[in-house]
């Protein structure tokens, strides 16, 4: 999968994605992150890409021309690509959206700055407007990196085992069960006996129940969207009495 990032600060993207799981995936050529500097497409000697807003107001606005030309450089006569504009006005990014976007062979992430981007280029090239939360950042780069991380780990082979993401939080609208490793006892607290029993059916049952309890306590809103069996529903009903 190829991520194209249209940005004024390509070094913010390149440095961040070069580490850990995503960095290894890039080195293994499972994914590619292609940062395009919008300033390279400015038609002036100072590489200026912003100007004062029509109608007045504070700050500067990114000009449409350099952004459009940067996008056009990706096409090479080919069909248009899916373009995600990182903006507080977009739909909130979540795991379901990450799964959908992970099906794309190529994805363009557009990072804004200053007071925003000229509306005309948004209308021309943007297919999706996405926000990573209800707050405002200095620019779209951090949001783009968050999306790359969340989407790339769903690409086959990136996590090493395709089962690694199956039981993670939000994968089925439930929070993940608690995890433990050695030592068996730490600060007077022991690993639950069920996890050392070797009885995989009981372990899976315990993990499912713990996932349900955690979701009920921390994010009960997710339960409305979760795929729950009758047994799950009975367990939640009984567990809610003790909370």
Image: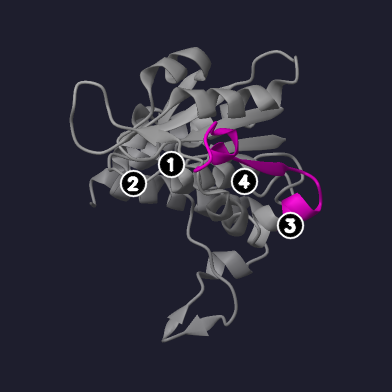
At a point 50% along the width and 36% down the height, the residue shown is 95
Front label number (3 vs 4): 3
Q: Is residue 169 visible?
A: no
**Element marked by disc 4:** loop
Which residue position holds label 4?
A: 165
**Of callouts 4 and 2, the N-terminal one:** 2
Is residue 18 visible in the rendered image? The answer is: yes
Q: Is residue 162 left or right of residue 206?
A: right
Locate residue 83, reporting x and y percent.
55, 24
The foreground one among 56 and 137 is 56
* Gap in angstroms between the C-alphas marked 2 and 1: 7 Å
Can you tell which mark lies on residue 140?
A: 1
Q: Quadrant of residue 11?
A: bottom right
Answer yes or no: do the residues labelled 3 and 1 have beta carbons within 8 Å? Answer: no
Disc number for residue 24: 3
* Distance Cα–Cα, label 3 vs label 4: 17 Å
**Is label 2 in a helix, a strand or a loop?**
loop
Residue corresponding to mark 2: 137
Q: Residue 169 in the image: state x and y as whole percent.
A: 48, 46
Give the magenta-colored segment's residue range: 24-46
Are there few (<14), some (14-19), or many (20+) residues within 10 Å of tag 1? many
First in sequence, mark 1 or 4: give its number: 1
Taking 186 as reference, is 127 above or below it? Answer: above
Q: Quadrant of the N terminus?
A: top right
Label 4 neighbour load within 10 Å: few <14, some 14-19, many 20+: few
Residue 86's tag is none
Whether the magenta-drawn stretch holds residue 93 is answered as no
For the residues marked 3 and 2, what is the alpha-carbon distance in whole angstroms? Answer: 28 Å
Q: Real-space Cα distance between discs 3 and 1?
A: 24 Å
Whether pointer 4 and pointer 2 mark residues with C-beta atoms closer than 8 Å, the reply is no
3 or 2: mark nearer the eye: 2
């Amino acid at each position: 999968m190829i991520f194209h990032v249209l940005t004024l600060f390509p070094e913010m993207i390149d440095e961040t994605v070069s580490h850990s799981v995503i960095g290894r995936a890039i080195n293994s050529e499972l994914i590619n992150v292609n940062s395009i500097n919008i300033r390279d497409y400015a038609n002036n000697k100072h590489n200026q890409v912003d100007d004062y807003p029509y109608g007045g107001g504070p700050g500067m606005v990114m000009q449409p021309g350099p952004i459009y030309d940067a996008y056009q450089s990706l096409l090479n006569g080919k069909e248009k690509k899916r373009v995600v504009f990182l903006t507080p006005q977009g739909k909130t990014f979540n795991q379901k959206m990450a799964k959908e976007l992970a099906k794309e062979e190529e994805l363009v992430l557009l990072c804004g700055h200053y007071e925003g981007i000229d509306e005309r280029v948004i209308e021309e090239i943007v297919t999706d407007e996405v926000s990573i939360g209800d707050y405002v950042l200095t620019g779209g780069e951090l949001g783009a990196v968050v999306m790359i991380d969340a989407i790339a780990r769903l690409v086959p082979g990136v996590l090493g085992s395709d089962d690694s993401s199956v039981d993670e939080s939000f994968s089925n609208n439930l929070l993940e069960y608690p995890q433990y490793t050695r030592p068996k006892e730490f600060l007077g607290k022991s690993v639950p006996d069920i996890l050392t029993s070797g009885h995989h059916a009981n372990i899976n049952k315990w993990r499912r129940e713990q996932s349900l309890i955690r979701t009920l306590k921390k994010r009960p809103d997710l339960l409305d969207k979760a795929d729950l069996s009758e047994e799950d529903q009975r367990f939640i009903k009984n567990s809610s009495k003790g909370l």
